[in-house]
Image: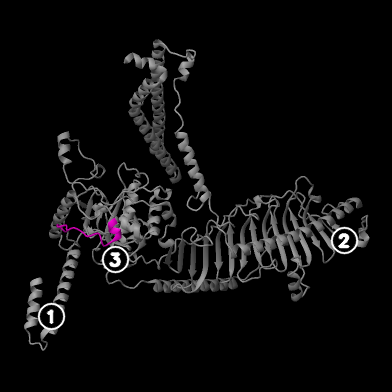
Amino acid sequence: MEEEAANYDYESYESGSTFTGERESDLDQVLYDSLFRVTREMIKETQQELGLIKLCWPEIDRTKDLYLKMLPNNYCTLSDKERLLAWYAENFRQQFQVKYPRRRPLILACENECGIQKFVSTTIRRSTLPYPELYTWQGCGKFVSDYVEYEPLDKPLSIPKQLRSPTWVQKFRKGNCFECATFLVSLLLSQGYNAYVVSGYASREQTLCDLTRRTCPYLPQPEKPERPASTHHEITKYKLNPPTEYKSYFAAELEEEKTKKLEEKMIRAEKEQQRMIEDLEQLPVDSYWGYRIHAWVAILPELEGLRDQEITRPLFIESTTGVSYDPKDYDTAQLYLGVESIWNDKNYWVNMQSSAKSCVDIAWDLTKVELWEHLLPGEPWTMRGVAEEIDDESAVQQEKHLDMPYSYVNEINISEEEYRKRYPNGMKIIFYKKTKVELYAPYLQTDGLIEKITVYDDYDHITPTEVYEYYVNRSDHLMETRKNKNDGSIIDYYGRGRPDQCKEHRYFVGGPNQVDSERILDFYHVARFDGLSRLESHPTYLTQQFVDRDDFLYYRHAEFSQKRERSARRDASQQDIHYRHISKIIEKFDRDERIVPRKNIAIREFAISDNEIRLTYHYQPGQFTRASRMYVKPTLAERGERLTLNPELVQGYSPLDESYRSLDLLYELDAQLREEDTSISQVRAAEKELYAFLDVREKEYLHPQLSVSIYDTLRDPESEMLANEWSRTESQMDTTEDVDYLLPYLARIGNPSQLSREDALWIRNECLNDYKHSAIRRANKILRKFEVHSQELARTQALLTQSEDLTREEEEQILEKMNEINFYLQTLETRLNRHRDMVPVRYQMLVEHLHRSPHLAILASDSQ
């Protein structure tokens, strides 16, 4: 190519040009340089498209980049084993290309951030992080999708230019699909999952991480309506027959035909609307359908693996979103269109199933060579299937093969502060179908906002209809806010712990912040002394609902008169919150079994404007009507110091036609007059409480305060100081003087000032014998526990295999119990092995300690 460029340059120089001298030579030099640059770029692109593996390894200058200076040498160099693997892989690639010329080139090796071509499997490094969320595949997938910012491939139809290491991804918090999948597989392998990076082809929306046509998974699920309790009608001997209904059959047929036509019209309109929505959501045709390169993660079942009970069938995980898919699902086949190869940190497999039209038809048995061709002949024993028994010499010959080199990447290490920050720059925005999701790290927003979901009426995310906001670490215990943009309603949800025990607050945006504005408050009634569960405020009424009160009150409704002018009310509201005049108070009570029904009040109404007290009592058993009574309140002048009863001002009804003494009626009237004053004061107290709540709430919204846990060492300096003080105390306890273990033995012989040789030998032998017996007792105790758990595991396995009518929940409980027992057995086995290894070491340390003991110095002098 360089010779062609030189010839082209020579011919252009010899042509009949009008330029002469230095100007002509400069033009020729520019033309030569441009042609030479294009040629080198074309060669490099061709090498990349063919997937060629470089077999020469020049040195890399790392002095120009600060990040490269911090990396170890193995990032920029290749070991002898890696070079041998490169030769091996290039030979494999050439044979594969010759045998299958129509298949796309394999992704075997890519350049890392240093420009050194590394085999893809060596980029995976198993890394365990100390965070409980990352102990499951769901948590790992969600964390990687939040932690790394996805960057689509520059050329979606070509092999990626680079496969940067997880170290680079962690440093800069971004990466393409191959880098995100490698990062996720590194975490999954450390947790015992049989995970692989999958290289294949996906849809345009999947490769671009376009979620604008998918339903938002963050939306709260609608609450399922409670099933009404089945009512058993009492079967009676006598019942009334329903009256005969006279109707026209012709009119009924006309009505039925009209209803049928209306239903058909509604069905057609619904189908038309559904068709219009499908046409609107129809994606444009992709001219590169089936050719866009993409990488994702697959978790396969593993024989006798750590997660064999959890992973029973193949599973796809999209590392860019953290969403899982079933490979056998039809919808998955529309997203993932084909698989070329898969790999982990042990080997590389090529998909040989040409008959598979999509991922649905792919068989994931890697032990079958006709389905999956592996690069290296050596693989884990779990991947080889069940083989016949062979002798030791043949087994040694089989193990003589090239295995995968150790990963050159450093182990992923994410600090607690970086883990809590989670998102790049602490925030992330995701667009779904008619929904926008904003995610924030804790303490990033001053109001404690961590998640905001906005629902729109259009696909362009312009007209919002609903907003969901979630908060954490709020001092006012605010957890969630729901806003409806259509009617302007807002619902605030609070957690337990507020002084007023508020649970929900429903109000309208833009409404006045006064006690007479329309709002509803729900409370945690268990934590309140008055049992208040709901308070509903309105310009014309105030309603309270109670639960489990000692006086059996469960409902209070106060109505206000509207006689006062607006200006007078506004002026009064600025001075006193009790400016509304109470016209009526209605109270309802539950049944008190200690009182007979005819004297137990069910409904009490204080008609203040009508100067009346109306009482309604509970039903008597077997009665269809109940007693009631109405008192006309005497004037204040008539009350005086001694209340008198005027029988003409009392009206009542009794189903049993009972008569009451005037003295009982007088006592009841006196009690109800006092109860009226109490009810009025309680209504005024409710207005005062509501006013105080609105005042506190306004301050909380204007100046939100965030709380810091005492266990948060990153933000609470006091807890960090206590942790440091505790560590210093522990270190001081470690440096205390040694305990004299011979004191109990000296006490047996009377604590003599000097020991004879016989006493010293007796003490030495007794001490050593006691240690031997304690070691044996501990080993026997571990063995007994191991036997007990082994028997329990056998019984549990028998229960799982012999029981055929187990539900899915019972089966999961049994599997969870088996995993817990296996964990105990592994722990006991580790303890027993450690005990066996440490007994002789500790015995020798005890012998040396006795030799140095001043009490047994006579033995040391005799030995000398």
Name the one closer to the observer, 261 or 479: 479
Membership of 55 in magenta stretch: yes
Camera-side residue: 544 or 625? 544
Amino acid marked by disc 2: Lys
Quadrant in the picture for residue 731: top left
Q: Which mark is residue 633?
A: 2
Instruction: Let me know if residue 847 appears in the view.
Output: yes
> Where 469 falls versus 840 (above or below)?
below
Q: At which x and y percent is residue 667? A: 88, 52
Q: Is residue 156 left or right of residue 51?
A: right
Quarter holding the C terminus is top left
Looking at the image, tell me whether mark 2 or mark 1 is earlier in sequence order.
1
Q: Quadrant of the N terminus?
A: bottom left
Residue that label 1 marks: 28
Q: Amino acid at mark 1?
A: Asp
**Which kind of residue does numbered mark 3 sit on?**
Leu
What SS does tag 3 mark?
Answer: loop
In the picture, measured across the screen, residue 55 lies left or right of residue 499, that is: left
| In this view, 590 is above or below 771 | below
Q: Is residue 714 above or below residue 810?
A: below
Q: Residue at x 38, y 19 (%)?
A: 768
Q: How many marks?
A: 3
- Marks 2 and 1 sit apart, C-alpha to C-alpha, by 116 Å
Q: Which residue is found at the position 75% from the left and 68% from the top?
A: 575
What's the magenta region? 54-69
Looking at the image, the residue that sits furthest to the bottom is 18
Q: Nearer the viewer, residue 583 or 257?
A: 583
